[in-house]
Amino acid sequence: MSDALEYLVKARPEAMGHYLAFLKASGRSLDPKTRALISVITKVHAQTERGLRQYLKRALREGCTPDEVLDALLVAFPALGLSRIVWAVDVILAMDLPAFRLGPPAAEPAWHDALATRSLRAGMARRVDCDGRGLLVFRDAQGWRVYDSRCPHQGTELQASALAGCTAACPQHGWTFDLRSGACTAVGDRPLQALPHRVERGRLLVQW
């Protein structure tokens, strides 16, 4: 959400509440990837660079591939025109996202050693830095849960200070998550990104 929209929500909560409810309800029949791609197209049509950057990252988090993003822009050519598509690609290239770099095919997901299983007791959560990536790890009697430490709203990193018991709260906009399931329980409506994991020889391994 832009600073202007946040201001309007606080200054005119009654009026803006109806608008935001309409936006949320209008896409209820669409899957998250389709909604994200439509949002990217609308930001390109308006040539809103900040919005394009925000919603492009959201589309990638929802599982969209670079090819799907480019195809969505090209399919929307009748509405966007070549100049807006070129503008959008310039913005995307300036973001220097690894997914959009041309080169050899990406390597298969690798397994990363996150922590010793004995270092985290059942019922506890911890933020772990692992090979350049932040992880939120929760353990209970049923097993382990591992999530990307970035808030699905705007990619804010959830640090150790965001954890309280089995919950994590984003300091930027208050999105709150239940680490037992990854579900968002307050403010927002999207879960944390869960990551594949396994236990091997007393170590918790995480794949990405």
Image (cartoon, rainbow, N blue to C red):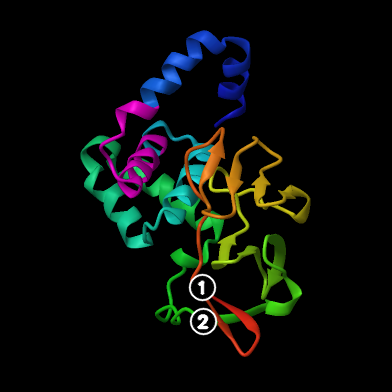
Q: Spatial distance from mark 1 to mark 2, Cα to Cα?
A: 6 Å
Q: Residue 152: image x %, image y %? A: 53, 48
Question: With respect to residue 106, does 192 lie above or below?
Answer: above
Q: Which residue is mark 2?
A: 110
Q: Are marks 1 and 2 in contact (CB under 8 Å)?
A: yes
| Helix, strand or loop at mark 1 | loop
Quarter of image, res 82? top left
| 105 displayed left or right of 12 | left
Please tell me which residue is depicted at 50% across the width and 57% down the height of the picture: 193
Q: Is residue 39 magenta?
A: yes
Mark yes or no: residue 116 visible: no
Q: Residues within 10 Å of mark 1 (few under 14, many from 20)?
A: few
Of the pair 187 and 63, the residue shown nearer to us:
187
Please tell me which residue is depicted at 30% across the width and 34% down the height of the picture: 28
Give the residue type at disc 1. Trp
Give the residue type at disc 2. Ala
Please tell me which residue is depicted at 64% across the width and 35% down the height of the picture: 173
Which span is picked out in magenta?
24-43
Quarter of image, res 104? bottom left
Question: With respect to residue 182, does 11 lie above or below?
Answer: above
Mark yes or no: residue 66 visible: yes
Q: Residue 32: image x %, image y %? A: 35, 46
Q: Which residue is mark 1?
A: 208
Please tell me which residue is depicted at 62% across the width and 90% down the height of the picture: 201
Q: Residue 137: image x %, image y %? A: 64, 64
| 58 displayed left or right of 161 | left
For the N terminus, the quadrant is top right
| Helix, strand or loop at mark 2 | loop
First in sequence: mark 1 or mark 2?
Answer: 2
Question: With respect to residue 150, does 35 lie above or below?
Answer: above
| 90 displayed left or right of 141 | left
